[in-house]
Amino acid sequence: MSFAPTNKRILIAVATTVVAALAVIGSTWSGPPGSDFALWILLCVLGEALWVRLPVGNATLSMAITANFAAMLLLPPGQALAAIAIATVIAEATLMRKSPLRFAFNAAQSLLAASAGIAVLDALGGVVFEPRAFGFPQMLACVAGAATYTLVNTAAVSMMIGLEHRMSAFAAWRANFANAYEVTSNAALFALGVMLALLIRLIGPAAVVLVGLPVVLAWMSYRHVLGAATASDDDYDERDAA
């Protein structure tokens, strides 16, 4: 199943989302990318490659949320958002072979979700990612940022499922995301993102190996519970995705 070309509401929704994402990246980008920018794109792509199918609307979700959230915590905002969007396009265009309309929407909505999460982190004073400086206030900021990211991300996906399948966005959200397993596993992936950021500050890129195994195990658990086996061009991506 693919976007119906005559469905103007879908085309308008995709165009609006992409324009909003371009405006956000334009307002947050500053300076040339750092030396580790390409590494973060790679990590986010690897997370995108670990995907599962959700119950309703041919939706999918991936494990990229761990790398995405770590990038949000460590990189300058514009670079974090760009890395997330670029990784989504690369993974969905090459690994999942989705249509340009789909990967454009998924990249844009993932960028907007991450931007909202970063805004909340900044509003709460930001996060100092040094192991000795990370305490309860920083933990609360991470929880609020993760919750905001999830709210925007799942709402965007549910809206598009509703438009294409002529059902309410709330019904799509309830079927795909409103269950204890989703909430718990989602929280675990965000927690792994925080751990990845802290460990990178402590020991460097080698931290990817330590966090990578739990992410793969989470993906295997998702596959077992949701019964997802193969990707198709017809998927919406919850987590960049996102």
Image (cartoon, rainbow, N blue to C red):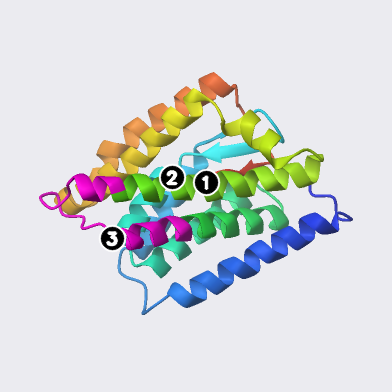
Which quadrant holds residue 209? top left
Location of residue 115 in the rendering, given as x and y in whole percent from the top left corner: 46, 61
The CA span between labels 1 and 3 is 19 Å
Q: Answer above or below: position of 63 versus 120.
A: above
The residue stretch that appears in magenta:
115-140
Q: Is residue 25 above or below residue 185?
A: below
Q: Amino acid at mark 3?
A: Gly
The percent coordinates of residue 131 (x first, y second) are 14, 49
Return the residue at label 2: 147
Query: Could you tell me which secondary element the residue under label 3 belongs to?
Result: loop
The residue sitting at 39% across, 37% down in the picture is 189
Residue assigned mark 3: 126
Q: Classify mark 1: helix, strand or loop.
A: helix
Q: Are marks 3 and 2 in contact (CB under 8 Å)?
A: no
**Mark 1 or 3 closer to N-term?**
3
Residues marked 1 and 3 touching at CB (< 8 Å):
no
Question: Which residue was labeled with disc 1?
Answer: 151
Mark 1 and mark 2 residues within 8 Å of each other at the beta carbon: yes
Q: Residues within 10 Å of mark 3 (few under 14, many from 20)?
A: some
Q: Is residue 87 magenta?
A: no
Q: Amino acid at mark 1?
A: Leu
Taking the image as drawn, is residue 233 in sight?
Answer: no
Residue 184 relative to residue 74: left or right: right
**Which element type, helix, strand or loop, lies under badge 2?**
helix
Q: Position of residue 184 (x, y in %)?
A: 42, 28
In the displayed structure image, the side of residue 93 where residue 133 appears, left or right = left
Tell me the amino acid under the disc marked 2.
Answer: Ala
Residue placed furthest toward the left: 132
Residue, x 86% and y 54% (percent of image)? 7
